Each structure stands twice: as structure tokens, then as C-alpha cells.
Amino acid sequence: MISIGDFVQDLLNPDLAFLPKALLVAVMSSVVCGVIGCHVVLRGMAFIGDAVAHAVFPGLAVAFVLQGSLVLGGAVAGVVTAVLVAVFSQNRRLKEDSIIGVFFVAAFALGIVVISTAPGYAGSLQQFLFGSITGIPDEDVYVVAVAGAVLLLVAFLLHKELVAVSLDREMARSAGLPVFWLDLVLYVLVTIAIVISVQTIGNILVLALLITPAAAARLLTDRLGVMMLLAPVIGGGSALVGLYLSWSLDLPAGGTIVLVATAVFLLAWFLAPRHGLLARRRLHSSARTPEDEARRDTDLPGPAEERTPVGSRA
Amino acid sequence: MTAAATTGAPPVARTDERGAGAHALSVRDVSVELGGRLVLHDADLDVDAGELVGLIGPNGAGKTTLLRSVLGLVRRRAGQVLVDGASGSAGTRAVGYVPQRHEFAWDFPVSVEDAVLSGRVRGIGWLRRPGVADYRAARESIDRVRMTHLRKRPVGELSGGQRQRVLVARALALGPRVLLLDEPFTGLDVPTQELLTDLFAELAREDGKAVLMTTHDLVAAMHTCTRICLLNRTVVATGTPAELRDPEVWMRAFGIATGSPLLAALGLSTTVDHEGDA
């Protein structure tokens, strides 16, 4: 285990130039995933995130075989799969999760077939699945930075529409919002967030960056705005701490980052204000009486109190 | 027997049928086909400002379909829907929709105020944030449903009746002329139902909204609605509760026999029962 001071020195060491790059990419992608993940968690579309994570694989494989940009290849494959899922889900005979189940495994299978044609594929397969902090090219740092900024901007600009659709699809549709296109935009956002994160953390663990920080943030607050600030902070912090631990203890980066994020999630579960396990126990033992709880559950403060304003209305 | 039994047409002659004073909501000969099945045909219904109309019929009668066709959510095979004399999206804009409570994601981390504000998304427009006018409108509609004291509360912590109020406030936030309520009483206890009914009646009477509400609570509807529309694939009859005292109409709408407890509950069965016994 090396000290934090040594870690900072390693970051500045020109011989270890891959380290600050990995840190930068890991933190940036965690922040982006944290924000986009809020939509994923609140809509209950974690499975879609999982699907997209697998679906980018054939694109990475093709890009690897053709020596092209991995980010670009992954993005194309992920977006194509996301669009296919969105289009095929319009048929209400099959539920969306079945459609997703069909396409994401197919995409993953295609990826394995493609990458098996490349010489020495076992090593690169492992790199794709579990991530690598050593092999990030300079231009990918810029790609991640630009793509991440665009993603956050789009999520910000379409925030109220995306939320309106998540809150109530029928209402959004009747209000004239293009629900299908907004769904598609969200799928694409998720895809790109995943693609830019795959490099450091790997194809299988990337789902954790999307779900875990957002889920932990949800436990800590009842306000959407706060949640969307907390999630990227938790994600970015987990990436920073995780990379430090992985470097100093010689552990795989992706796995360590995910375990740190999971630890934060568990802490939130136990310690969250009001809803956490401890807070609930404290509530039960002191301040609130059972009657208070019961009153909270009834409709309005009480019929009498509710009727008074009727008469007082001018 | 009575005028109320006439198919389609309202029993009370309306002087402004084709006059300048258009109905707040006018459904004309609407037919809807879903999956190749005609679920609604030649439905005719007018709702005027100040009316609270109960849309009543058995399951599968097309009540929700009728609401959805007013909202433009299902394609009509034939017919026309006019809101304040306007058709298409111009008309839909003047309709406030209160869906069934389960349509809304109550586990979302938003406050009552945010939820109501989401009703104005369309009015706010793309790439813009809610302004003073939007917050004011949201606050007024929250006040109208008497939820001001819970304005900041997360929606997940509300009771069923409070949630229904939030949905009504959200629909009111765009200042609609017509209010469509889909099964607002499902899963609520009787005191809560009565408080909500009072609210809906007020919205019609005092605010001049044209309120159309589907419900399975027939007794309450006969009690509180200014008019009743009996639907079964098409409009079987419309009229004031007093005009719909003919059990035959109800038997036709619900496909029930003379001895049905439903008629007894509505207080319509006595004479029929005697005839049946004889």
C-alpha cells in the first residue's frame, strides 16, 4: 500500500503517463454515467443499461480488428442496438425486456465471433471485458471529454422533457411530446455514456458506474436536482478512490472502482437520513410515535381540517 | 319509454346545437378500432362548461377509449372531436387529462410542486426553463385542490387521495376548459371519494370547467353528477340523473337482468321486481 503522497508523485511521473490519463478518463466517465444513470435508475431501465453495455461489444471488436477508434465503433454498435430495441418495442405483443434480451445477447455473440478472427484474441478479449488502465491513447482522452460534455449538455437541455416522460408517458404523449424520440435520445445517451466508460472499467462492470452511484444518491435524497448532483460526485469519488486503491494494492482498476462505489451504496443504505436503516430505527425508538406515522398515511390532515377552507374560499 | 332512452341524442333539447356558442367538448359520431375490433362506434356526447358528466358503463364499454380519442392518443376511424369548436391539436391543448393514478411514477424524487409543474412542460417549450408565470400557475392549481400545505412534500409520501389531487392540479396547471378524469376513485375510501367529488363539482360549478369523469361508482355518480352518459360501445343514453330513472336503459347499458342488485342499488328495481315476480 502506497501513501496518497506517493500516488500523487506517480501521477506526475512522466514514465507513468498512462496513470493520469486513466484517472482522468475514469473520473470523467463516472461523472457522466452518474448523471445519465439517474434517469436509468428512476425509470427502472437498468436492464437496458446492461443490454447496451453488452451491445457495444461487437462495435469494439470490429474497431479492434480494423484498428479503428474503439469509442466510435462501440458507439455505432450500441446506438444501432438501442434503435433496434426502441423500434421493435413498439410492437406491444412482446414486452421490452424480451426484445432487449434477444438483441443484446445477439450483439454480444456477434462481438465474440468477430474478435475471434483477430490473432491473439484471448488477451484482447480480457481487456475488453474487464478494462485496462494502461492502454488508453491520447486522443481517447479528448474523445471522452468532448463526448461527456455533449452528453451532459443534452441531458441538461432535455431535462424537463425526459422527466415528464418518465413521470407519466400517457400524459406526456397527450401533451404532444414526441415520446418515441425522447426515448431514443435517452437510449443514445446511455449508450455513449457506456462506450466512453468501457475502456477503463470494462464491458461487464460498466453497468455499475451507471447504476450504483445513482442508486446510492436516490437513497440519500428525495429531490431530483440533489440526486443528479450527488450521483456524479459519488461516481467520480469512487473512481478516484478506486483507482488509488487499485494502483497502490495492485488490484484490477475496474473491479476496485466498482467495489468502492458499492461500499458507498451500502453506506447510503444504512446511514441515509430519514430512509436509511439507522434513521428508521432511531425514528421508531424516539421522536415519532406510531400515531404520528399513522396520521401521515391518512388522507390529508383530516376531513374537518380539509373542509374548513371550502367555506373560507371567497 | 322516456326521452332518455333514445339512443345517442341528449334528451333535453339543446338550443345551441349548431349555434355560435360551441360546446366546451363535443364528440361527434366517433368510432375507434383497436386491433381490428370496433370498440367504440358512433359515439355522440357534448359537455358544456359548468357540467360534471359521469361517463358510465361496464368494463370494456370503451370509456377509456373515448377519453383517449378526445386526447388524440388513439386514431379515430370516423367522427370528430371539437374542444371549444377547435379540432386537432389546437383542441387537445384545451383539455386537461387526469389519468388513473397508477400511470404516474410516484417513486420519483419530486415534490408536489414539481409534479404539478410537469403539467406545463408543453407550454414552457423546448430548451426553456419554467418561468415566474409557470410557478404561479402551478401554485394556483395546487391551491385550488387545497394541497398548499403539502407543496414541498415528495410525491411518494402522499396518500391515495392526495395523489389524486396532485394529478388534478397538474391537469389544471395549463388552464384547460375541459377536464377528463379517468377512474379517479379507484382504491379510495368513501370519505376521500366524497371530498374529491366535492372538488370536482366545484371545479365545474365555480371554475366553469367542463368535467367528464369515468367511474364505476354508479350510486355516487347519480348523486353528484349534473349529467350521466351511459356507454356501451356507443352512447346508450345521456341525461340528468332524474331523467335516467328508466331501468331498461341501465339493463341495456350493462347487459343485466331485471333482478340485478345494480338496479336495486340505484333504487330503480322495485316496480320491475314486482313485474318479474308476477
Image (tube, coloured by chain):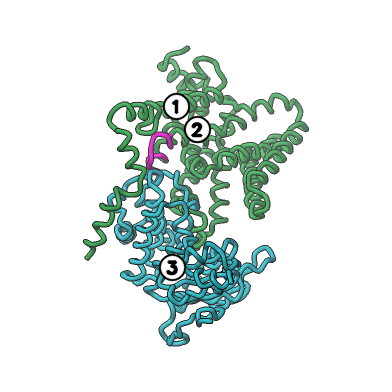
Chain colours: A green, B cyan
Q: Quadrant of residue A75?
A: top right
Residue sitting nearer the eye, B238 or A275: B238
The amino acid type, in three-letter code, at marker 2 is: Thr
The numbered disc on residue B222 is: 3
The amino acid type, in three-letter code, at marker 3 is: Met
The residue at 51%/45% (across/down) is A43
Q: Are marks 2 and 1 on the same chain?
A: yes
Q: Position of residue A286 (x, y in %)?
A: 29, 27
| Residue A218 magenta | yes
Lateral position of residue A120 relative to residue B238, left or right = right
Instruction: Return the residue found at the far top.
Output: A1
Instruction: Return the residue found at the far front.
Output: B278
Q: Which residue is mark 1?
A: A264
Q: Residues within 10 Å of mark 2 (few under 14, many from 20)?
A: many
The magenta stretch spans which residues? A217-227
The amino acid type, in three-letter code, at marker 1 is: Val
Q: Which residue is mark 2?
A: A212
